[in-house]
Image (spheres, rainbow, N blue to C red):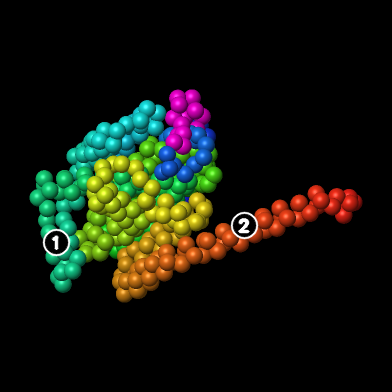
Amino acid sequence: MEYLLAFVIAFVLAFFSTPIAAKIAYKIGAIDVPKDETRMHKRPTPLLGGIALFLGFWGSVIYCWFDFTDFPYNSVKLFGMLGGSLIVLGYGIFDDVRGMKPWQKLIFQTTAAAFTVFISNTRIENITMFFSDDGKMMSLNPVLSYVVTIFWIVAITNAINLIDGLDGLAAGISAICSLSLFVVTLIRTDISMDVKLYTTIITIAIAGSCLGFLPFNFNPAKIFMGETGAAFLGFTLGVITIQGTLKSYAAISIVLPVLILAIPLFDATFAFFRRLTRHKSVSQRDRSHIHHRLIDMGLSQRWSVLTLYVASAAFGICAVALAGDRIKYGAYLLLFIFILIFVGIKYMKEFSQHAHSMAVKPEKNTEQIDSLAEDNPENNKDQTI
């Protein structure tokens, strides 16, 4: 009931505050006007959907903080996350209204991550030697520990930001990732109960706020989450994976968050190296992300988004299998997913082209029938539709 209540509160708050966020966006000029080929929408659309995501998430979490006696396991960690997310919210609103340069956004992202890390002492202290037979740990010295933690949070923040290129994509992927983290945390036996309760409440609140926002953001979108929402979701997911999923000495701990966040992490990593090899700035926008490639293959926006939903959910299921000590089945499932993805990509273009040609034929036939009807009006004089 605690999980259900946290989800419902986040969903309801995000759902009813989204139209208010859209109205604010129109008033202050936070509008995304399609002006280059990387933008897939055709008409000006309000931003600031991240305000609704922020209100839904924190409204739910703060209610749980006051109402649930066992939550949180450490209020300092929650305060650190709140302070960092407020920094992200502030710069996100400014970017959606006025615009900021990539290096300026990076400074604010790093500041938010550093605030959370130093205030709440949220950091990656050990890295498990995954392929070691006895599960040895490599302890990080304090300086390296802080650097690695801040890098991870900033990387996840930008990974969610980069994948926010189609209607409903970032919100749906974030919901799937948070639900996967929720289930993984529930079934794990190698973390304490206080950490488990804290992590599950945070992740279910993320999912609730994303799903409450999604009806307004799915294609055709009435509002975008903007930098405000994408940075907030990425930041929160980055922090909670450290405070919860990585809060264990089990060897599998380092694999689970990477697997759950596989789609945005792969897209961000591929974009980074793609731009480097093409001698372009890593912050320069391009039209070669995963979702753009699916569009270029002939899929519609909705089908491209749904395809990535399925892929993200599949990786989440693999993480659940691995977390439940079903490593053999998880490995088989992961191999099957990779094979399915490669085969699907190979035939997806051919299938979409065939579907497109089939859709065009009736239109041509309709034009021929209409022309015949115009030439022979007597034949249709008494017919009704």
Residue at the outermost top position: 27
Q: Which residue is mark 2?
A: 360
Which residue lies at the image location 38% right of the left edge and 36% below the top edge?
A: 228
Dot 1: few (<14), some (14–19), or many (≥20) neighbours within 10 Å?
A: some
Tell me the kind of residue under disc 1: Met
Residue at the outermost left position: 141
Q: Is 12 included in the stretch rendered in magenta?
A: no
Q: Position of residue 147 (x, y in %)?
A: 16, 45
Q: Is residue 138 above or below residue 26?
A: below
Which residue lies at the image location 21% right of the left edge and 39% below the top edge?
A: 114
Q: Closer to the camera: disc 1 or disc 2?
A: 2
Q: Is residue 347 above or below residue 194?
A: below
* Span highlighted in magenta in the image: 21-35
Front-lying residue, 76 or 272 = 272
Q: Which residue is mark 1?
A: 137
207 sits to left or right of 253: right
Front-lying residue, 124 or 283 = 283
Q: Position of residue 125 (x, y in %)?
A: 16, 52
> Which element type, helix, strand or loop, lies under badge 1?
strand
Occupied quadrant, residue 230: top left
Which residue lies at the image location 31% right of the left edge and 74% below the top edge?
A: 328
Front-lying residue, 291 or 308 = 291
Dot 2: few (<14), some (14–19), or many (≥20) neighbours within 10 Å?
A: few
